[in-house]
Image (cartoon, rainbow, N blue to C red):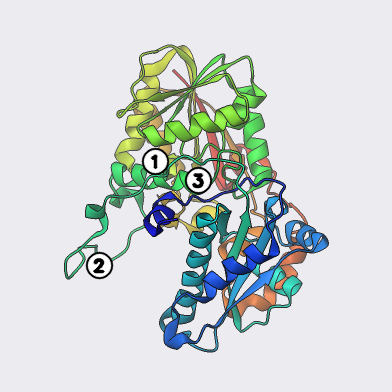
Amino acid sequence: MELKSAIWGRRTIRRFLNKKIPKNLLNEILQAGIQAPSSCNQQMFYFISIDNGNLKRRLLEEAGFKWIDRIPNPFFVITDKRFGNERFANIQGAAAAIQNMMLYAYSIKIGSCWMAGYGDKAIVKKLLNIPSYFHILGCVGFGYADEKPIFPIKRNLSEILFSNKVNFALKKSNNPDDWSYNEIKNLAARTIFAKSPNIGYYHLFALELEKQLDFVNRNLGESVLYLDDISGIYIFELAARKPDSKFYMVSPSEKLIEWMREKADFHRLKNIHFIYSRNLEVNKKDFDTVLCLDQFNRIPADNRNELVNLSYRNLRKDGKLIISFLNKYSIYGMLFRSGVARRYGPEISLPWSHVCEIITKNKFNILERVGFNLLPSPRLFFKIGVPGRYTFFNRYMRFLAKFNFFEGSVSKGFLSRFSTTNIIVVKK
């Protein structure tokens, strides 16, 4: 295969046929990795083949490495950080080896997937007997593809090429108010292609999500408009739980709509309709329910007001708007009171007073405010990453993580003020 065809044509594969790759071909793929450039030719990277079924099970159940059970030939790539660690030289060499392997695999019609989300690093290192002086670059899975992913969004060269110097702001900001709405939406639309339609995204707190879905489901009407769903976490679950209701999702991204349609087809959901609209305007104006879930914290303040105003215009008389937001005065929200950089872009926790002002300004009456997740699970610390000097707490945090405590809590009244996520039901 021509090199250009391999570079432009390779896609990340997450569904594989139940078909073994001959050992000689696997060795050829690994040999391609060895040919990669590395600092001073040190080649400090190593490969760990995972071909033991019991080990795969333990990586899944103990370390939380999702989907490893569906990958025919997973290889962990590690690098010795004692040598060439300055300026990430050893990491660069290992990353180049991974890219070589994936391109060569594609050239011989073998699919691959580079996974940084391999679960709890400390547990993975223990299970694979990896010393503390090694980095784990990730896990690369190989197999024969059982899917043809949609062509992803790639940025134009003009967006990323600078001459001699860059023009970025000297101080970083993770506050959406310092970003444009288009910048945030373009990043979110690109990011959605990080997963195949059959996998989707995961909520940070699984038990909290389940409680939220139950609550929202009880408040849905027969005709539901979801304004610009970013991740697909909610709409597919809600549509599956409420098959007799009709769901409409409107988005300013044609690519995101394409991805959503494929996901709906995969899950055989016939009650979701997708609408492309640059300004989120839709022709139908008499919805029972409008949803603004998991996005208030991710967009500038002016656009929050526009979403609520748009919701008012699209609701029939006595229709309900349901909004969720990350509460600034929760334990989790206090961590992000100045903003945080997440997968979809910047995000910031919000005070109730700000959300309430937008709601009342747009002529809505508040019916109910419910709080979810009073005390986040200690699992959060392993997702975010525990700083090295505090790793001695790991054993205690792992013990506490076995219990949910208040993660699944649903609070009303006073306690809702301190819950991680607030959901508000308002009426036109």
The 10 Å Cα crowd at callout 2, few under 14, some 14 to 19, many 20 or more, is few
* Residue placed under numbered mark 3 in the picture: 326
- Which badge, 3 or 1, comes first in the chain's sequence? 3
Disc 1 marks a residue whose amino acid type is His
The 10 Å Cα crowd at callout 1, few under 14, some 14 to 19, many 20 or more, is few
Q: Nearer the viewer, mark 1 or mark 2?
A: 2
Residue at 49 percent across and 75 percent down: it is: 35
- Which badge, 2 or 3, comes first in the chain's sequence? 2
State how many labels appear: 3
Q: Which SS class for mark 2?
A: loop
Real-space CA distance between mark 1 and mark 2, rounded to the nearest whole angstrom? 29 Å
* Residue placed under numbered mark 2 in the picture: 170
Q: Which SS class for mark 1?
A: helix
399 on left or right of 78: right
The 10 Å Cα crowd at callout 3, few under 14, some 14 to 19, many 20 or more, is many
The answer to whether the residues at label 1 and label 2 have Cβ atoms under 8 Å apart is no
Q: Residue 237, percent across and down?
A: 62, 31
The answer to whether the residues at label 3 and label 1 have Cβ atoms under 8 Å apart is no
Disc 2 marks a residue whose amino acid type is Leu
Residue 144 appears anywhere in the view = yes
Compared to residue 276, the image places residue 129 above or below, namely below
Disc 3 marks a residue whose amino acid type is Leu
- Which badge, 1 or 2, comes first in the chain's sequence? 2
